[in-house]
Image (cartoon, helix red, strand yellow):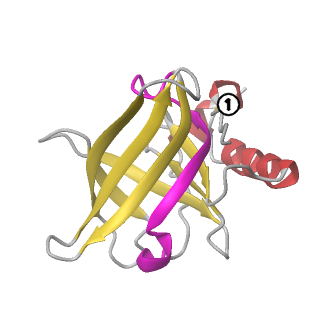
Amino acid sequence: MISASEKTKPQELVDYVDLPRFMGDWYVIANIPTMFEKGAVNAIENYTWNEEKGIVDVTFTYNANSPEGKLKHMTQRGFIYDTTSNAEWRVQPLWPLKLGYLIIDLADDYSYTVVGVPNRKYLWIMARESTLPESVYQGILAHVSEQGYDLNLIQKVPQVWN
């Protein structure tokens, strides 16, 4: 069970995110899903640096409910909020809404990352490949539990590629 103090203490963010290395495709391995992500299969989050606007263009694609389901996508904009570490963003799914987006874990080789939100209601565990070794996944779960996330809410996202 998550204590009240774990839910209210500030989350520890990674020290630094090299934005060019962070850009590209990330397979969503597991999450605490938003209403838009329920039933998502083969979910991929793509980040592209928009030099002209100084923002990150975010595209989320997935198949609805099965690997053969309708291909869907959502676009968002990412604004780097903490430009010293690049680990705290604001993501805008719809104007004028901007939501906190916290990079709380990132492999040294950028093979996986974990993104949370300030109220711990949502979480994304993502990797550069469509699978993660179980030992790495379990280590991530231990870390997010220490950050105050409820492990019972985390769901694996099916990644079924031919």
Within 10 Å of disc 1 (Cα), the crowding (few <14, some 14-19, many 20+) is few
Residue visible at 40% across and 51% down in the picture: 101
* Residue on which disc 1 sits: 2
The percent coordinates of residue 70 (x first, y second) are: 43, 25
Q: Is residue 30 magenta?
A: yes
The percent coordinates of residue 89 (x first, y second) are: 34, 59
Q: Is residue 20 magenta?
A: yes
Residue visible at 21% across and 77% down in the picture: 51
Q: Is residue 48 left or right of residue 134?
A: left
Name the kind of residue labelled 1 in the image: Ile
- Front position in the image: 135 or 90: 135
Q: Is residue 42 left or right of residue 137?
A: left
Residue visible at 18% across and 38% down in the picture: 94
Q: For the residue labelled by badge 1, is the local secondary structure a helix, a strand or a loop?
A: loop
Residue furthest front as drawn: 162
| Residue 143, placed above or below residue 47 | above
Residue visible at 15% across and 70% down in the picture: 53
The percent coordinates of residue 131 (x first, y second) are: 73, 49
Magenta segment boundaries in residue numbering: 17-38
* Residue 73 quadrant: top left
Total count of labels: 1
Residue furthest right as drawn: 135
Image quadrant containing the N terminus:
top right
Q: Is residue 48 left or right of residue 106?
A: left
| Residue 79, placed above or below residue 97 | below
Image quadrant containing the C terminus:
top right
The percent coordinates of residue 36 (x first, y second) are: 39, 26
